[in-house]
Image: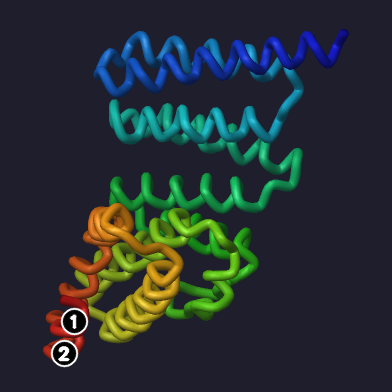
């Protein structure tokens, strides 16, 4: 009986979340906000902490992408971390820390953004001692969470570029180029696993920010060969 009740609650929570996403896409944000909250409140009653963590991640993304309410987004990502730690879900922990890094990067808080970038790498079992260092492409690729890796590394690249703009330290620019090359290797490996027109469109849309940053890094370093490579 308890299992049946939990299943019904789980399905109800999922239905509320689907409605929330639909209203989000329709830009009916007040309704979407309310439905996300209802979905999470119901999901907590099921005891499925992993899914609660995922729901908070999606709720945080809603606040980030649709409303740009960064304080509320941070709260959701911290809740993601809280619940993910209870179930030892390292992939979710990496995703939440990646998203927090991006938020702080948007606010030009480079020190805090750096902290969350390093935490995300650690949860991927690819720790870095500082932003001038990179895990190997093999270590990152084998994690299997492609989208998180792409966002995380691009966050690192943007962080290095912005810090270079402030400090004019060429070591940061060299580290940025090395990071771009690691990213390019990972994307090449990922692309080999996918073929077809839909895959080409996916990669074009999903990696355009990276290649824009890679070309910018190349020109800042007066490296025309690298710039043409990334074009």
Are circles 1 and 2 on residues that touch, CB within 8 Å? yes
Q: Which residue is drawn at 31% across and 60% down?
A: 196
Q: In this view, does 219 lie above or below 101?
A: below
- Residue most toward the right? 1
Q: What colour scheme was applied to this rendering of the protein?
A: rainbow
Q: Horizontal placement of 126 versus 184: left or right?
A: right
Residue under label 1, please give it.
218
Residue drawn at 66 percent across, 52 percent down? 90
Tell whether 206 sits left or right of 10.
Answer: left
Vertical comparison of 18 with 156: above or below: above
Q: Is mark 2 on a helix, strand or loop?
A: loop
* Residue 161 locus on image (x, y percent): 26, 69
Please determine whether, in this image, residue 83 is positioned above or below residue 200.
Answer: above
Dot 1: what SS?
A: helix
- Horizontal and vertical percent for residue 38? 54, 11
Q: In this view, does 189 lie to the left or right of 124?
A: left
The vertical placement of 194 against 98, above or below, is below
Quadrant in the picture for the N terminus? top right
Q: Report the Cα–Cα distance between label 1 and label 2.
A: 5 Å
The disc label shown at residue 223, or none: 2
Q: Which residue is at the front of the view, 229 or 45?
A: 229
Q: How crowded is mark 2: few (under 14 residues within 10 Å), some or many (20 or more)?
A: some
Residue 204 in percent (x, y) is at: 24, 59
Q: Where is residue 60 in the image (x, y as percent from the top left)?
A: 44, 32
Nearest to N terminus: mark 1 or mark 2: 1
* Label 1, residues with CA under 10 Å away: few <14, some 14-19, many ≥20: many
């Amino acid at each position: 009986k308890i299992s049946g009740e939990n299943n019904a609650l789980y399905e109800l929570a999922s239905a509320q979340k689907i409605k929330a996403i639909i209203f989000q896409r329709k830009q009916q944000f007040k309704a979407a906000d309310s439905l996300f909250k209802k979905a999470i409140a119901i999901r907590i009653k099921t005891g499925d902490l992993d899914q609660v963590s995922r729901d908070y991640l999606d709720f945080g993304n809603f606040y980030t992408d649709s409303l740009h309410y960064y304080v509320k987004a941070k709260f959701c990502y911290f809740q993601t971390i809280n619940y993910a730690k209870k179930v030892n879900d390292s992939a979710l922990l990496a995703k939440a820390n990646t998203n927090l890094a991006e938020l702080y990067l948007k606010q030009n808080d480079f020190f805090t953004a750096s902290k969350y970038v390093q935490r995300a790498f650690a949860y991927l079992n690819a720790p870095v001692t500082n932003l001038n260092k990179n895990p190997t492409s093999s270590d990152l690729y084998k994690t299997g969470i492609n989208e998180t890796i792409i966002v995380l590394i691009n966050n690192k690249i943007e962080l290095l570029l912005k810090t270079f703009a402030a400090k004019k330290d060429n070591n940061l620019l060299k580290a940025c180029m090395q990071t771009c090359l690691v990213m390019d290797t990972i994307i090449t490996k990922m692309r080999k696993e996918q073929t077809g027109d839909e895959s080409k469109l996916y990669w074009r849309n999903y990696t355009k920010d990276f290649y824009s940053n890679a070309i910018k890094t190349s020109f800042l370093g007066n490296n025309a060969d690298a710039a043409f490579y990334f074009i």
